[in-house]
Image (cartoon, helix red, strand yellow):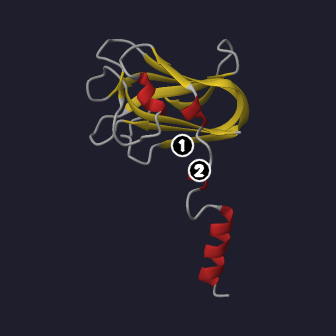
Amino acid sequence: MKPFLLVFALLLLSGIAFGEEEKRENLALKGLVSATSGLQADVVIDGDRNHLYWDGALLPGKWTLEVDLGEIRLIDTVKLFFWWGDTRYYKYFVTVSPDREHFSMIADGRDNTVPPTAKGLTFSFTPVKVRFVRLHILSNRENGKSGHVREIEVYGK
């Protein structure tokens, strides 16, 4: 077998060639979402990365979105899709909890200065048992006020 075909066959079998992540179940789709401010928080778990987005409202302070998976699940990946298409970037961090009392940080973007893209941000980590996933948005470059999120995806078992 030619080297190219061998490599392609191995990638295909491993799921890398066509995005293994896309084949996994997005656990957030079956969850509930709440927000500290803004309207229509449910659009961040509707499975659509490209159209509607949640706007945390132009209020000073921090903006938080929380996804409740409904039960404790073993997760290993969180994907975030912020508003993209201009020069704004967001400062944020992500925490997870099994009980809404004890939280652990799984992603730290508090020093972020890179504008988001349509590819989103993927955070993979050692599997952890959680029920709640929180996105804390601290600011955005455009006006310093509000957060804009298109989708939050959660993967695991």
Residue at 68% from the left image edge and 67% from the top image edge: 13
> Do the residues bearing badges 1 and 2 touch, measured as CB atoms within 8 Å?
yes
The residue closer to the viewer here, 106 or 82, is: 82
Label 1's element? strand
The image position of residue 148, as x and y in percent, is 36, 28
The amino acid beneath tag 1 is: Thr
Find residue 21 and name its label. 2
Please give left or right for residue 20 compared with residue 115 in the image. right
Q: Quadrant of the C terminus?
A: top right
Residue at 34% from the left image edge and 34% from the top image edge: 52
Label 2's element? helix
Find disc 1 in the rendering and name its residue.
Answer: 122
Number of dots carrying numbers: 2
The amino acid beneath tag 2 is: Glu
Q: Is residue 152 visible?
A: yes
Residue at 27% from the left image edge and 29% from the top image edge: 142
